[in-house]
Image (tube, rainbow, N blue to C red):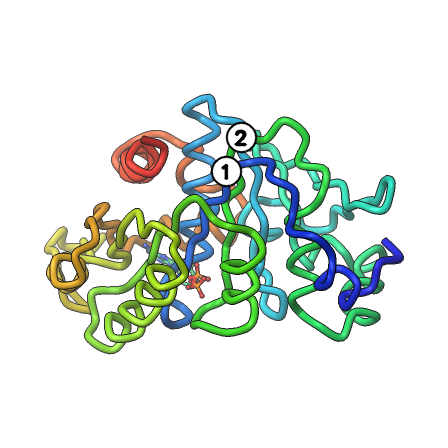
Amino acid sequence: IAMTADKAAAAAPVPTGPRILAVGSGKGGVGKSTLSANLAVALARMGRRVGLVDADIYGPSQARLLGTEGQRATAHDGKLVPVESAWGVPALSMAHLSAAGQAIAWRGPKISGALLQLVDAHWDGAEVLVIDLPPGTGDVQLTMLQRCKPAGAVIVSTPQDLALIDAARAVELFAKGGVPVLGVVENMAGYACPHCGETSDPFGCGGAESAAADMGVPFLGRIPLDIAIRREGDAGTPTAAGTGPRADAFAALARQVAA
Ligand code: ADP
């Protein structure tokens, strides 16, 4: 990977390969990476050939979420070769690039160039590329819009007002950029106490659904705040790879975005 970021950014648009599904959020910490990983795994379980790009260049978390920490991407013919995970989802993250990636991260002055090299990699045979974007509406998002032509975007928000205001900005960015917003997912909605079983709403509930209605975009569903989702994420064994209601919730989301 000798190509510098500048050169990459000036090159022709990323060749049309897999259908790009961008997962964004207005703000960090709302569960966008967790959702991206589980969505990709759920799509793979549906039989889709899916790859995952961790476009959170400065705060990559997909290597941990997919249990591929310590694996290193290689390069072939000037393009990166994704690492394989145990879930049928090949992935590329800056965390996979400590050696190969130095060229990308440090030689390329522009973060956009790094993004393009993650996207324009050997995603051989992938039908869908799930892209876990950094939070907000910055350089990576603009490059994604202008150069990668996503087929659709999914916006993740907690039910909280503050997160929703930022989510609305993310929705607007994609909509203005001509990218169909497939819908909004409400994450961390409702917490079932493991001790008493009572459900409470630490971040409120239903906010994302009404905000989606206000913005005229679909509401795709809600994922509860559940300690098992956090634990499984940290362990690199995505919830969507398991069984039961939690895995089903991610499968339901995957069916909607795959439609
Ligand atoms: P983002 O990508 O938006 O910054 P992450 O996916 O990294 O957010 O999630 C932030 C933290 O919240 C992580 O510790 C993650 O395990 C946890 N988390 C995300 N979604 C849930 C959920 N539904 N239930 C419990 N913990 C969650």
Of 15 and 208, the residue lying toward us: 15
Contact? badges 2 and 1 (CB < 8 Å): yes
**Relative to 129, does residue 199 appear above or below in the rendering?**
below
44 in relation to 226, above or below: above
Q: Position of residue 164 (x, y in %)?
A: 24, 70
**Foreground: 145 or 36?**
145
Estimate the x, y position of residue 212 in percent, counting from the top left. Answer: 18, 58
Query: Is residue 77 found left or right of 211 in the rendered image?
Result: right
**Which residue does the image show at 47% across and 50% down from the upper left?**
233
Specify the amino acid type for callout 2: Glu
**Label 1 Cα neighbours within 10 Å, binned few <14 / some 14-19 / many ≥20:** some
Q: Secondary structure at mark 1?
A: strand
The residue shown at (40%, 50%) is 35
- Measure the alpha-carbon separation of dots 2 and 1: 6 Å
Question: According to the image, label 1 marks what residue?
Answer: 19
Is 179 drawn above or below residue 16 in the view shown? Answer: below
Q: Position of residue 169 (x, y in %)?
A: 32, 72
First reached walking from the N terminus: tag 2 or tag 1: 1
Q: Say which residue label 2 marks.
A: 127
Which quadrant of the figure shows ligand 1?
bottom left
Asked if disc 1 is less than 8 Å from ligand 1, the answer is no
Residue found at x 19% / y 50%: 219
